[in-house]
Image: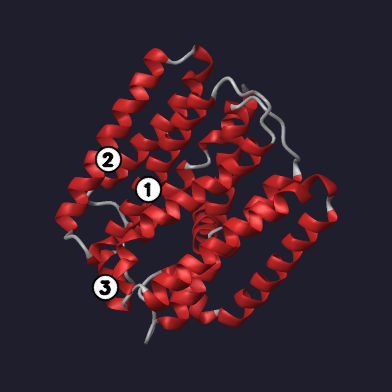
Amino acid sequence: MDSIRKILKFGNVLSLDVALGAMAGMLFFVDLLNTAIPAASYMLLAMAVWSVYTLDHLWDARSTGGKAHTNRHFFHQKNFKKIASIWVVVILAGLMMAIGTAELRVLLVPGLLIGGLMMVWMAFIRLIGRNMVSSKEFSTAVFYVVGIVLVPYLYWENEHSQSVFRIFALEYLLLAWINLLILSYLDKESDQEDGFGSILTLISPGVLKKLIIALSAVSVLGLIVQLVFLDSYYHIHSGILLVILLIHVLIFLDPNQDKEIARQKLEASFLLPFFLVFF
């Protein structure tokens, strides 16, 4: 049990669980749209998501005046040069994979465009638009969902389910936003101590808690409606999102939950779409 906990902790500190969760999200939309994509695109997405999250952590670690108050930022402080070197290797390997693999070249331009826009937005928030840091959670959720739906959508040939695709993309966006809001709520003390901005620069923790509960209620209601009115083919997809959401709600409402363990559980819940390979 201790070994499993150490693995989960290590994976969370290095954002490996987030990268795996993105792969599971891509599989979710591949199955939803009943399409096929190059297998290598899963690895390419994982590398891209890991690179973005790691850059964010490295940036935070370097900007912190003293010792960081969270495990992940302290780990990046302590191992800054090693992680930064690995980051460069992963970026170069991803570019070589996209350029050198014929079936992935179609993803090169849109992938670079999305990645470039996200990098510019991150820099804008940190260097110029400090007063816009309150939108960080929502903008991150948008980029995350765009990233996981990009490949399935590009390879999708059926144009008869556009409305269903939009519904699930919106539900996934709402779920990703709720996840990031909960993480900001859990990290409110450490973010303040380290000088990191979040939505809490705009609203109080009490208002944020009400916002999370309201968004969760809307999402639960929407998923229940989907279970009732959408074709049975989509029930498993609605059910998976509902389970992930309920896990978030239960963890958020548990006042005795350890923050680091809560973060690990929240990120691990996004791995549930991998169960679609058995159906």
Residue 93 horizontal/vertical position (percent): 75, 64
* Residue 248 higher or lower than 260, as above or below: above
Gap in angstroms between the C-alphas marked 2 and 3: 24 Å
Q: Name the residue nearer the viewer: 45 or 113.
A: 113
CB contact under 8 Å: marks 1 and 3 = no
Marks 2, 3: nearer the viewer: 2
Q: Nearer the viewer, mark 1 or mark 3?
A: 1
Would you name the residue on which mark 1 appears? 177
Residue at the (60%, 40%) spot, across then down: 26
Between residues 127 and 96, which one lies in front from this camera angle?
127
Q: Hey, what amino acid is under mark 3? A: Gln
Q: Which residue is mark 2?
A: 215
As drawn, the residue found furthest toward the bottom would be: 65
Quarter of the rendering containing residue 219: top left
The local secondary structure at tag 2 comes to helix
Q: Is residue 50 above or below residue 125?
A: above
First in sequence: mark 2 vs mark 1? 1
Which residue is pictured at 57% across the width and 33% down the height? 29
Whole-number angstrom distance, CA of label 1 to CA of label 3: 20 Å
